[in-house]
C-alpha cells in the first residue's frame, strides 16, 4: 500500500563504470568537507563571545535600589505568593532609627532568598512587585555550580551594588513616557 | 414580622431588623459590604456609608421611594419595603465613590501593613472600587504615638469607623482611647499619653477593619498568607473569655492568636489578653484542626485542603476530609 508519493522505488542494480571507478565519489565527498571549512560556523567562542539575546530575556534576579541608593524591597511577600515554584522566601524586619538611608520603608527584608534550582524564570515576581524592586536581568544568568546550596541566592548576591556605575547596564529600558508613568505611580504609593 | 423584597428576593424578618441583617439572612453576593457596622457591638454603624442601598418603596402603606440612598446597617425594615442593592446601578456607582472617599487619606502602604490579606478596606476597594486614583493632594499624617506593648497604632490608616471605641467601652473596664479632634484632624488617640493594656483590649485589633490597630507581638513577623490558621481552644480561667481562638502557625511557631471570625469578619466570642498575647505555645492549646478559608481569600494561596465532600454520599472517608460545615464554616476574612 502506498501512503505517500515520496517513497522511492529501490532496486538492486549493478554499479556503473563511474561508480566502480571510486574516485569521483571520493572527490564529491572531499568537496563537501572542503566547503565546510569556508562556511559560517555554528558555534561561537563562548565565553569571550556572546550570542545576541532578546532585550526581554528573563535571567538572574536583581533587587533594585532607588535613586538615593535605598533598597526598594519592603518584604511584602507578593513575589513569594505569586511564585509558582515557591522559590522565594523572606524574613521581614523593622527599620531602626538611622537606617533611613538604607531602606525606603519602615519594613524591609532582613533576609531574602531565591532558590535558583526551583526558579523557573517566569517573571511573575517582577510582575507582582508593587515597589519595582525585583527584576530579572536580561544579560545575566545563574551560572552552573558544583553544590546545591550555592544556588540559594541571598541578599548578598541579589541586591545591586550601591555604586550606580557598577550596576548592570542592560535590563529593561523604559521610554521617557513609561518612566514618567512609573514615577507617578510610585509617588502615589509612597504618599 | 415584616416582609421585604431585597434585590428581588422576598424575605420575612422580625420588626426592627435592619436592612443589612435582613440581607445577611438571605446571604450570598447580594449582602451589602459593611466597614463600620459590627453586629456584637452596640452603637456601631452609620459611619462609613459602605452599605448604602436604594429603597425603591418605603413600605406597603407608603410605597414612595426614599429620596436618598440609605445606610442599610442602621435603617430598619418596614412591611412591604423594596430594597435594591446589586440590581441598582446608582448604588454600585455611589459605592465606587465611597471607596474613593475612604481612600482619600489612606496611605496605601499595603506592602508594609500587617493587615494586608485580611483587610476589609482592601477587599472593599478590590470588589467595589476603581483601579486608579484621582487624588493628587497631600494625605494627612500624624505624629506616631505609642499606645503600649500589645497594640500598634497607625493613625494614617484609620478610617474613623469608631468600632474600637465602642469595643473598649463595652468590653474593657476602662476606656482610655477615643477620637480626638474634629474633621480632618480627628484621630484615634489616648489622652494624655496613656497605654492601652486593660484586659480584653486586644479585641480592638480583631475589630479594626483596616491596619490602624495591629498586634505588636505579630508586627512584621510574617505576611498573613504565609501562615496557617488552626482552630484551637483552652480552658481560660476568665469567665468572660471564650477560649476559642485561631492560632496562626508558621512552621511550628504560633505567630499570633486571634479570635474566631464569622463569614462577615465579625467576632462573636471575645478572648482575653492573656489568651491573645501570652499563650503562644502549642502546648497551651487544644488543637481542633485547620480553620477553613474561603478560596477567594489570598490566605488560601498555597494552602492545600481536601475538597468538601458529603459524608453521606461516600462512605469510609478519612475523618480529615469530612468538614463539619455547621460548626466550622469557611472563614471569610472580610467581604
Image: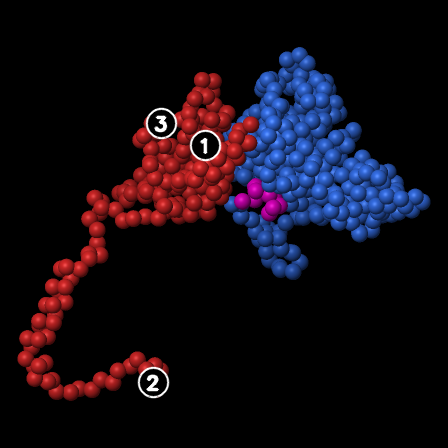
Q: Dot 3 corresponds to which residue?
A: A162
Q: Dot 2 corresponds to which residue?
A: A2
Please provide the residue range marked out in magenta.
Answer: B291-301
Tell me which numbered mark, 1 or 2, is placed earlier along the sequence. 2
The answer to whether residue A188 shows anywhere in this view is yes
How many numbered circles does the render carry? 3
Question: Which picture quadrant has residue B255?
Answer: top right
Label 1 – label 2 distance at C-alpha:
66 Å
| In the foreground, A78 or B90 | B90
Colour assignment, chain A? red
- Subunit of label 1: A
- Nearer the observer: mark 2 or 3; the answer is 3
Is residue B203 within the magenta segment? no
The answer to whether residue B259 shows anywhere in this view is no
Is residue A181 shown left or right of residue B181? left
Where does the C terminus of chain B fall, quadrant-wise? top right
Q: Main secondary structure of the magenta part?
A: loop
Where does the N terminus of chain B fall, quadrant-wise? top right
Give residue B99's position: percent from left, percent from top.
67, 36
Q: Are marks 1 and 2 in contact (CB under 8 Å)?
A: no
Tell me which numbered mark, 3 or 1, is placed earlier along the sequence. 1
Q: Which chain is blue?
A: B
Amino acid at each position: 500500500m502506498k501512503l505517500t508519493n515520496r517513497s522511492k522505488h529501490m532496486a538492486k542494480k549493478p554499479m556503473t563504470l563511474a561508480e566502480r571507478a571510486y574516485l569521483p565519489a571520493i572527490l564529491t565527498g572531499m568537496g563537501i568537507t572542503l566547503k565546510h571549512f569556508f562556511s559560517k560556523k555554528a558555534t561561537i567562542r563562548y565565553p569571550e563571545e556572546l550570542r545576541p539575546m532578546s532585550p526581554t530575556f528573563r535571567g538572574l534576579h536583581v533587587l533594585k535600589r532607588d535613586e538615593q541608593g535605598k533598597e526598594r524591597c519592603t518584604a511584602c511577600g507578593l513575589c513569594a505568593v505569586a511564585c509558582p515554584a515557591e522559590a522565594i522566601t523572606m524574613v521581614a524586619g523593622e527599620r531602626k532609627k538611622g537606617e533611613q538611608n538604607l531602606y525606603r520603608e519602615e519594613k524591609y527584608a532582613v533576609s531574602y532568598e531565591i532558590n535558583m534550582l526551583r526558579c523557573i524564570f517566569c517573571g511573575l515576581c517582577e510582575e507582582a512587585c508593587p515597589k519595582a524592586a525585583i527584576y530579572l536581568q536580561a544579560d545575566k544568568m545563574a551560572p552552573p555550580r558544583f553544590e546545591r546550596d550555592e544556588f540559594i541566592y541571598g541578599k548578598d548576591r541579589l541586591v545591586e551594588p550601591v555604586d550606580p556605575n557598577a550596576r548592570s547596564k542592560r535590563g529593561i529600558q523604559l521610554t521617557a513616557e513609561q518612566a514618567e508613568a512609573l514615577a507617578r505611580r510610585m509617588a502615589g504609593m509612597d504618599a | 414580622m415584616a416582609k421585604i423584597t431585597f434585590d428581588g428576593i422576598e424575605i420575612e424578618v422580625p420588626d426592627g431588623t435592619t436592612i443589612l441583617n435582613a440581607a445577611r439572612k438571605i446571604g450570598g453576593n447580594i449582602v451589602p459590604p459593611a466597614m463600620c457596622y459590627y453586629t456584637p457591638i452596640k452603637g456601631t454603624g452609620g459611619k462609613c456609608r459602605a452599605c448604602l442601598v436604594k429603597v425603591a418603596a418605603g413600605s406597603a402603606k407608603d410605597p414612595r421611594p426614599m429620596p436618598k440612598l440609605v445606610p442599610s446597617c442602621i435603617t430598619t425594615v418596614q412591611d412591604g419595603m423594596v430594597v435594591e442593592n446589586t440590581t441598582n446601578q446608582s448604588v454600585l456607582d455611589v459605592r465606587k465613590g465611597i471607596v474613593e472617599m475612604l481612600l482619600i487619606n489612606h496611605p496605601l502602604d499595603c506592602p508594609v501593613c500587617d493587615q494586608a490579606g485580611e483587610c476589609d478596606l482592601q477587599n472593599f476597594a478590590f470588589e467595589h472600587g476603581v483601579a486608579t486614583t484621582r487624588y493628587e493632594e497631600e494625605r494627612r499624617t500624624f505624629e506616631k504615638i505609642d499606645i503600649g506593648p500589645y497594640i500598634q497604632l497607625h493613625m494614617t490608616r484609620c478610617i474613623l469607623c469608631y468600632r474600637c471605641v465602642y469595643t473598649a467601652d463595652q468590653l474593657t473596664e476602662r476606656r482610655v482611647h477615643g477620637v480626638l479632634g474634629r474633621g480632618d484632624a480627628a484621630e484615634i488617640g489616648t489622652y494624655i499619653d496613656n497605654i492601652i493594656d486593660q484586659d480584653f483590649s486586644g479585641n480592638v485589633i480583631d475589630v479594626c477593619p483596616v491596619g490602624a490597630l495591629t498586634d505588636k507581638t505579630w508586627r512584621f513577623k510574617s505576611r498573613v498568607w504565609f501562615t496557617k490558621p488552626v482552630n484551637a481552644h483552652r480552658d481560660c480561667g476568665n469567665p468572660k473569655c471564650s477560649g476559642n481562638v485561631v492560632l496562626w502557625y508558621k512552621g511550628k511557631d504560633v505567630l499570633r492568636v486571634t479570635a474566631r471570625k464569622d463569614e462577615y469578619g465579625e467576632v462573636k466570642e471575645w478572648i482575653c489578653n492573656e489568651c491573645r498575647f501570652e499563650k503562644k505555645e502549642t502546648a497551651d492549646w487544644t488543637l481542633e484542626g485547620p480553620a477553613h478559608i474561603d478560596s477567594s481569600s489570598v490566605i488560601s494561596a498555597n494552602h492545600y485542603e481536601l475538597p468538601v465532600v458529603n459524608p453521606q454520599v461516600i462512605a469510609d472517608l478519612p475523618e480529615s476530609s469530612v468538614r463539619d460545615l455547621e460548626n466550622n464554616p469557611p472563614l471569610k476574612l472580610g467581604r
